[in-house]
Structures are given as structure tokens and as C-alpha cells.
Image (spheres, rainbow, N blue to C red):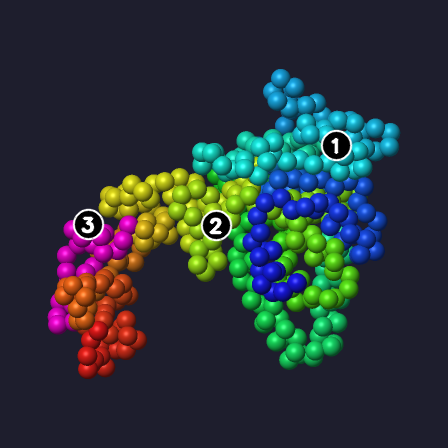
Amino acid sequence: MTTLTWERVAVATGPGEDPEAAVRQAYREAGLAEPEHVLVLPSPAAGAVAAAWLTGGHAVRRALEQAGLGALPDRSPSDGGSPTGSPSGDGSSTGSPSGDGSSGDGRVVMRDSRGDSGAEGREPGDQGVPELRRAIGEALRSWESYGDPGRSVRDVVRTVPWERARAAAYAELGPVGWAALWDETGGRLWPQANRLVNDLRRGIAELGGEAGEAGRAGQVGEAGLALRRVTLDAVLGQHDAPWLSAFDGHEGLDGLKRAAERTGWWWPFERLAIVTERPAELHLDEVGRLHRAVGPALSYSDGFALHAWHGMPVPADFGAAMRELTVERIREEENAELRRAMLEHFGLDRYLAESGAKPVHSDETGVLWRVELSDDEPLVMVEVVNSTPEPDGTSRTYFLRVPPWVQRAREGVAWTFGVVEEDYRPERET
């Protein structure tokens, strides 16, 4: 597979074909017995909660319950669900907690009944938490009948194969050759994939809620910490594409490669593999950061979603609010990062015009404007006129943002050219 193809793997959306077979192959290639059961969940958030619940002990379960992320009461058939299945003598489920039937071979599939279009038509604001909680509750009830999932085998399944492949490549290519290979493959793909991984870990931790009164504002609580820890134990599926791209042709990685092509994150245990699906939608800006003006930038079929503006996490209703921005609304925003995003969308020059800003200096190069912003550095811009006329004979005006320490228009224009004011002597301005 080419690096370009691996780049597509890292950002692929929609359900992958038969993720269970890929995961079972990864177990076999690692020299392990296949898991007795494979639990397929719609999102890494659901997977993380399930893994934390099954392995975290009483304190973690209590924290998850307090955050509203514990096992929920069974739904009656009249509520649209089906009774929880009970284990039969051969260890397979005789019923289906999701209502779509157990495979009878140790596979329990939990997918949103609406399919991969479930994220459409939903009002933003709660990350789809009701749907997510329902999927988690059903999943936990289905597995608890079977007992201990066993120890994590992530190191055997993922870490050891990576170390073995890297050692073989290093021995064959030497330090210089290995560095060149990595630069051409994984080194290219890792920054974007790593951003997505960090965004997901943050969003999953935030599902656990903020800390209590003793904690700082915005600090995740005990449930959030447990969720963050368990995400570190996941095999990253499609987000393992960067390092896998460096080892095309190496033996013993076919299962991991198939899993990367078909799954989201997954958690391997001795008796159980928790596998999650890829996102339903993914929206990125031109440099590969999560970004969407209206709606979630990253969403899953169970409703778990992340909203972002050029990589910055924003509230779910942020995009809709941007369509009705006013100078007053921007001034009232207490979060400095959100206010900067609002300014960017509103237009810095428009903000200057509508906020009553006054010039602080002018000379032959332009006009310097300054607006104070609460809890943030001031907005300082230099207004310049393009000396080259447009085809219709008019001259275009530009507003260039400059550092807050700039005091004179000429000083600001010089800064945009990377020189000090005394050295700014253009022969001709364009």
C-alpha cells in the first residue's frame, strides 16, 4: 500500500468491512488464541467507557455511574429495545441486547439502529449523549454475563510487532536509511493523525464531566481521568496508519493493517476484543485540523461528536452563533480563544469599523488602529492602500494585523516585511 493510500486510511469514514475478522487475524499473528467474544461499538467513546467499566474496579464504575455513563436499566420491548440476552451453556448469547441478533459465535455487534446516517438531522449540543449512553448500557449488560475479559494484550498484539518491524528495518537500512524511510512515510502522516488522536482523547475524557468543587474549572473529574487513561491502552486502528505505512511488505503485520483499514480504535483483552467503528463524518481545514463552521467536525453514528474551529474545540452551538455575530457578542465572550475565532469569522476590518475604533497614528505608509480586548492582547492593525490600482482604477485597502507593541503605522508596515522601522525604505510599494 502506498503512503498516499495510508493517508486516506487515517481519515476514512463509514463502517469498515468485517472488522472482526481483521482483529482476530491480529491476535493469531501475535501468537495468541482468538478472543472468545468481539464486541463492536459505534465509537471510541463507547469503547473507552466499556473498557473502563470492565477493567477499572469499583471506584471507576461508581465515577462512571455518577457521570451518567454506567450500565442503564433494561429497555422493555415497548421502548423499542429487546431484553438482554443470557449466556447459554456454550458461552454464546441466546438474545441480542441491540435487537439485531447475536452471531452465536462470540460476536456481539452494537450499532446505532439508524446506521451511519444517524448523525444527520440531530440538534447539536449534547454530543449525542443519550444515544451513546444507550449503546454503552446495552454493551455492558451483554458482556457482564460472561465475566472477566482477562488482561490487556495490547503489548503483544500491537507493541511487540511494531518493535520487531522497526528493528528489522533499522538493521536492513541503517540509521540514515531508517530516518529517510520514516520521513517519507510515517513522519508525513503522523502530525495529522496525532492531532486527531489527541482531539479524541480530550473529547472522550470530557464525557466524564468536570471535577467537583475542589477542582479547577474545565478540569476533568475522576470519570474523565479514568477514560483518558483507558484511551492510552487502545490500539488506534485507522490512526495507526502512520507507523504501518513504513512497514509495507513486513511479515506479521497483515492483521494490524487490515484492522487499520476497517476499524476505529480497539481494545484487545485475553477473552474479549472491544472494537469500534470509524467516524460517520470528518471535516478538516486546509492544514488537516478539525474544522466545521456549522455542525460537528467529527461525528460517530452513536452521536458522539467533536465541534472545532480550525482545530480549536468549540461549543456545539458555536457555528450557528457565528452566523449572527455582532460587535457586542464578540465583546461579551469571556473565552479569549473563542473570541479570536469570532473575530476571524466576523472580519478584523469589519470589527474595527463597527466597534468605534479610533486611529492612534498615521503617516505616509498608512493608519494604525487599536482596540482593547478584555483578558486578551489588544487588536492592533495597520490600514494600508495598495499602490497598484485595480483594473477598474480603484485602489484596494488592506488591514494587516501587527503586534500590540507597535506604536506607529510605519513601524507596523515594516514589521510585516520582517524589518525594523529604520530599515524600511521601499523603492516602490505594491
Observer able to see residue 67:
no
Q: Is residue 260 above or below residue 93?
A: below
Start-end of magenta stretch = 346-370
Mark 3 or mark 1: which is in front?
1
N-terminal-most mark, 2 or 3 = 2
Q: What is the C-alpha distance between the residues marked 2 and 3?
A: 32 Å
Residue lying at the far front in this picture: please name it. 391
Whole-percent x and y of residue 232? 64, 52
Q: From the viewer's perspective, is residue 64 above or below residue 246?
A: above
SS under mark 3:
loop
Q: Which residue is mark 3?
A: 355
Left or right: 65 in relation to 319: right
Q: Is residue 214 placed above or below 192 in the rendered structure? A: above
Q: Is residue 111 above or below residue 330?
A: above
The one nearer the camera, 308 or 115, is 115
First reached walking from the N terminus: tag 3 or tag 1: 1
Residue 174 appears at what percent x and percent y? 69, 79
Q: What residue occupies the far left of the structure in this picture? A: 363
Disc 1 on helix, strand or loop? loop
Q: Which mark is residue 283?
A: 2
The quadrant in which the C terminus is found is: bottom left
**Residue lying at 74% horizontally and 41% vertically, measured from the top left:** 38
Q: Residue type at mark 3?
A: Ser
Q: Is residue 293 magenta?
A: no
| Label 2, residues with CA under 10 Å away: few <14, some 14-19, many ≥20 | some
Residue beneath label 1, please?
102
Kind of residue at disc 2:
His
Quarter of the rendering containing residue 406: bottom left
The amino acid type, in three-letter code, at marker 1 is Ser
Q: Earlier in the sequence, mark 1 or mark 2?
A: 1
Picture residue at 64% right of the left edge, 80% below the top:
176
